[in-house]
Image (tube, grey):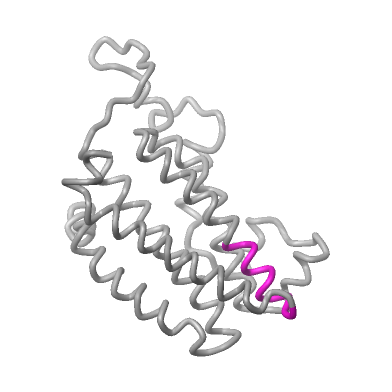
Amino acid sequence: MELLAKEYKKHAIAIEETFMIIDECIDLFDHKARSDDYHRICGLVLAKARNYALGAYGLILDGLGQEAGALLRPFIEYHELLTYFRLKPNRVQEAIDDKLPSAGKRAQLIAGKFHEFRKYLNDNASHSSFSYHALNHLLEKPDMTIRKEQPMLPKVLVKNMGDFFVQLLLMANEAINCLQTADMGCAGKQAENIEKLRIEGIEIFKLNERVSASA
């Protein structure tokens, strides 16, 4: 909490403001939910995604970034579910009838871009795994004794916050797109604010530097 109040205050505020935009989108969906199935189902999907995001963020702040991946996997599925409904709004009837295709099938139908990321989470975070990525953080170096608690490493924290911010921002964008598809202009303020946050976030989290370093 001291890091969030001082060194990483801007980072924390950017994430909080993204959550605020998602909350506003939920309210906009809810405004028409009682008379429109599309808005009702999309609002419920976004609310569920928000819960997963909040849980993952809490784990990240506790130093459990790797374990947060277990919540990010269904978070990604709910993101893709919003896209699935946006592209063909009448698909919400499949949700109402409890006859949705599998997450993998939905990803294929929308040409989803999260396949490799979801596979990584499946292999190393969401299920029992003995891979290097799944267990490396549990071992002390160099003697390889089992680590009971995760140390708070500022550089790791800010990297995980940056990764989380990107995923949260993408979800907010998709929610806005879903709203605008049904009623163009209804989320204009949110669209302006999320674009402002995107630009600010690139600088705050030094996202361009990270992309260059990995290229």
Residue 12 at x, y percent in the picture: 29, 52
Q: Quadrant of residue 179?
A: bottom right
Residue 43 at x, y percent in the picture: 62, 67
Q: Front-most of 208 and 178?
A: 178
Q: Quadrant of residue 205?
A: bottom left
Residue 163 at x, y percent in the picture: 34, 52
Report the side of 92 relative to 194 (left or right): right
* Magenta stretch, overall SS: helix
Q: Quadrant of the C terminus?
A: bottom left
Residue 97 at x, y percent in the picture: 83, 64
In the rendered view, would you say 36 is above or below 15?
below
The residue depicted at 49 percent of the width and 44 percent of the height is: 55
> What is the span of residues highlighted in magenta in the rendered image?
35-46
* 38 within the magenta span: yes
Q: Front-most of 80 and 110?
A: 80
Report the side of 25 relative to 142 (left or right): right
* 64 within the magenta span: no
The residue depicted at 63 percent of the width and 69 percent of the height is: 42
Q: Quadrant of the N terminus?
A: top left
